[in-house]
Amino acid sequence: MPRSSPGTPFTDWLRERAVPLTHLDPAAPLDDLTPLRDIIGAARVVAIGEHSHFIEEFALLRRRILRFLVERCGFTVLAFEYGFSEGFPLDAWARGEGTEGDLAGHLATAIPVGLTEPLQWVRRHNRTASPPVRFAGVDIPAAGGSLLPALAPVADYLRRVDPETAPAVETAMRIAASFAGGSAAVAAPAWVRLPAAEQDALTAILARLLVRFRALEPLYATRGDRHDHDVALHRLEGACHADYTFRAMAGLFAGDGLTADTSARDAYMARSVLWHLERLDPGTRTVLVAHNAHIQTTPISFDGHLTGLPMGQQLQRALGDDYFALGLTSVTGHTADMHRDEKAPFGFTLGDMALKAPEPASVEAAFADAGLGLGIADLRRARTEASDRPDRIRLQGTYVRTPVIDAFDAVLTTPVSTVTTDLRI
């Protein structure tokens, strides 16, 4: 390829520097992805995003990149935008526990965001792999749909090491059960309808349990296993962060929320990634799959108002160059149009919405103007080689203003996106 010089317009820089890819099929040969090894360098955590959930091309690309990173680059952990607490049974299943059919039961209550096929591939891979690929959940319980996936095992742990807390835990679980749903789209409005006294009681109980958990750690250590303690503590932290998120979202929609108050969920996701890294062998490399809005390394703002500090920003702060964010987007096509419906299993139904033409100054417009199809660009090089920078990227069916070259280390663009038809929504 021709060598770019400092000051090259971004579209021209893309035309010269972007790496074309030839396949979407996860089972296809991987040779066209070979340049990705140099692009990610020695990063310990490589995050793969998407501008919208429920997109067929993004799901295929994530599976293909996962296979490349495992088979060609030695990655041995798949972390996912999925509950930390709920992730442990999936890790056991991926390493061969149970039957093939058990996976459907594990995922029966989870929003279908493309986890089934990667897990099935990991299980097949692990039949002959050493070491096996592990699975790690990193999200708050049920992605904010229910505190119970975290609180139920915490209650079991506390009954063994601190039975005096049983009444408080049972009260918290009773309140949590009263607004639990399949997703935050169900639980958040149900939480708003709770009496304020119930909302406050739940928050107070969770806060007291968390402080007590930390204060009595030496005592708990004499009564149980250290690993069990660490898992239970992080589960309880997940319940606290989810509870905080309900208040933050209520404030956001009421118009009186605090600045960046929705960061609690992303903070927990970042801490979950670090929690797993601290317990893995040195040098273990992790593939992290989540929405672009979670993996980007710059703050999220809408209409000039700071809304949240994403997981990626917090991971970059903790890991530096060991964190790498790969955003996925599309030039045209369709995206999932989510319609709120509390009677639906997950609190929303999906429609098929045509994407508008790429906006000027967007990264998608630059790819289109450069005449590129399926391809990947190393944006870290553009930071020093391109004279101008795209200032927006797709988010669902709209655009969000963000310094794209700083928010992502690389971007992979497909010429078209389609909404997957294999959904239980």
Image (tube, rainbow, N blue to C red):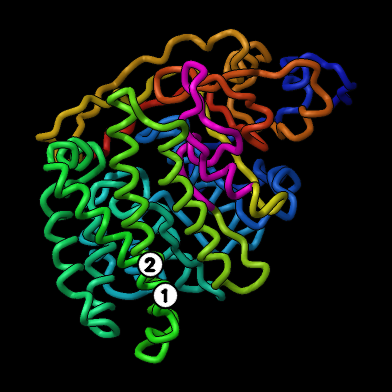
Say which amino acid is labelled 2: Val
User: Is label 2 in a helix, a strand or a loop?
Assistant: helix
* Kind of residue at badge 1: Ala
Crowding near pointer 2: few (<14 within 10 Å), some, many (20+)?
few
**With 302 as the anchor, is 402 left or right in this view?**
right
Say left or right for 399 vs 235: right
Q: Position of residue 397 (x, y in %)?
A: 40, 19
Q: Residue at x 28, y 51 (%)?
A: 142
The residue lying at 32 percent from left, 60 percent from top is: 207
Magenta extent:
288-316
In-front residue for pair 350/102: 350
Question: Is residue 326 or residue 28 the one in the foreground?
Answer: 326
Q: Name the residue under label 2.
A: 211
Q: Is residue 84 magenta-colored?
A: no
Instruction: Give left or right: position of 64 versus 236.
Output: right
- Residue sitting nearer the eye, 63 or 155: 155
Q: Where is residue 21 in the image (x, y as percent from the top left)?
A: 62, 34
Residue occupied by mark 1? 215
